Amino acid sequence: MQKPTSIPLKIKVCGMKYADNIAHLNALQPDFMGFIFYPPSKRFVGLDFDKSVLASIPKQTIKTGVFVNATEAEVIEFAHLYGMQAVQLHGNESPTFCATIKASGLTLIKAFGIADDFDWEQLVAYQNVVDYFLWDTKTEIHGGSGKQFNWQLLSKYKLNIPFFLSGGISLDNLAEIKNIKHPQLFGVDLNSKFETQPGIKDTIKLEKAFFYLKNNEI
C-alpha cells in the first residue's frame, strides 16, 4: 500500500523560543509549531517565556509543547497555561501516562528514538492512547541531535497510527523523504538542520523546505 501522492505532508517546526523568529515562521504557516519545556534542552523555552508571544500564531497552526519525563500534572498544567493544543512526549512515558494526558483534551504525539534494535512490538500498547507517533534518532539527549536514523526501518511499522518523521532532516534529504511510500507517513519535524544556532531557525532554509514539500520543487 502506498501513501497517496496528492496529500502533502504536514510540517512541524520544533524548538521555537524567540518572538521575532516565531513571527517570521508564522508567515510560512506551519501545521505544527513546537515549544520545548525540557530544561536540559538547548532549545528550552526558559523560565521567563512570555506566553503573550504565542498570541501571534495563526489558529490553524497547532501549538505543541514538548516534554521529557515530566509528571502528568506538569504536562497538563504547562500545556494549558501556554495554550498548547498538543503535547509531544519525548521520554519514557507509559501508555497509562499517555492516556491521562490525552483524556485532558490535548492531542498527543508520542516520540520514540529509533535504532536498528528498536522493538516495534512495544507500540501496540500505545495505539489507543496516542494520536500520532514521532520517530526520531535514538540519542541520550532526547532529540535535536541532527542525526538521521536508517529510514528503511520504517517498513517494520505496521500499525495504523499516523507518524511524523524526525531526526537529521535537512534540505539535502527532502527528496529521499518524498520517496517514502509508507501509508502512515503524516508529516515531518524540522529542527536542528534549519537553525543558525539552537532555538533560532533559518527562515530562508525553511522557506525552501516548505516550498519543496508542498510543491515537490526546490
Image (cartoon, helix red, strand yellow):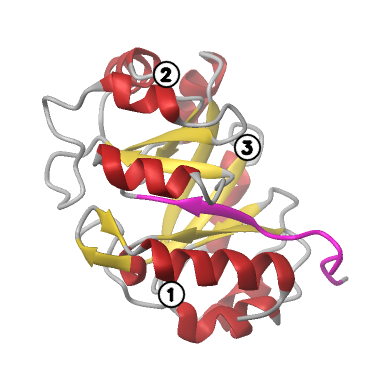
Badge 2: how crowded within 10 Å, few (<14), some, or many (20+)?
some
- In space, the residues marked 1 and 3 are separated at their CA atoms by 24 Å
**Who comes first in sequence, dot 2 or dot 3?**
2
Q: Where is residue 118 in the image (x, y as percent from the top left)?
A: 46, 68
Badge 3: how crowded within 10 Å, few (<14), some, or many (20+)?
some
Is residue 152 found left or right of 43 in the rendered image? right
The three-letter code of the residue at mark 1 reads Asp
Residue 157 in which image quadrant:
bottom right
The secondary structure type at the circle numbered 1 is: loop
Check if residue 162 falls in the magenta segment.
no
Identify the mark at residue 117; answer none if there is no mark.
Answer: 1
Q: Name the residue under label 2.
A: 83
For marks 2 and 1, give the one nearer the viewer.
2
Is residue 115 found left or right of 9 in the rendered image? left
The magenta span reads 2-14
Q: Which of 148 and 85 is in front in this view?
A: 85
The secondary structure type at the circle numbered 3 is: loop
- In space, the residues marked 2 and 1 are separated at their CA atoms by 37 Å
Q: Can residue 108 be seen in this view?
A: yes
Q: Name the residue under label 3.
A: 131
- Quarter of the image for the C terminus: give it: bottom right
For marks 2 and 3, give the one nearer the viewer.
2
Residue shown at the point (17%, 49%) measured from the top left: 41
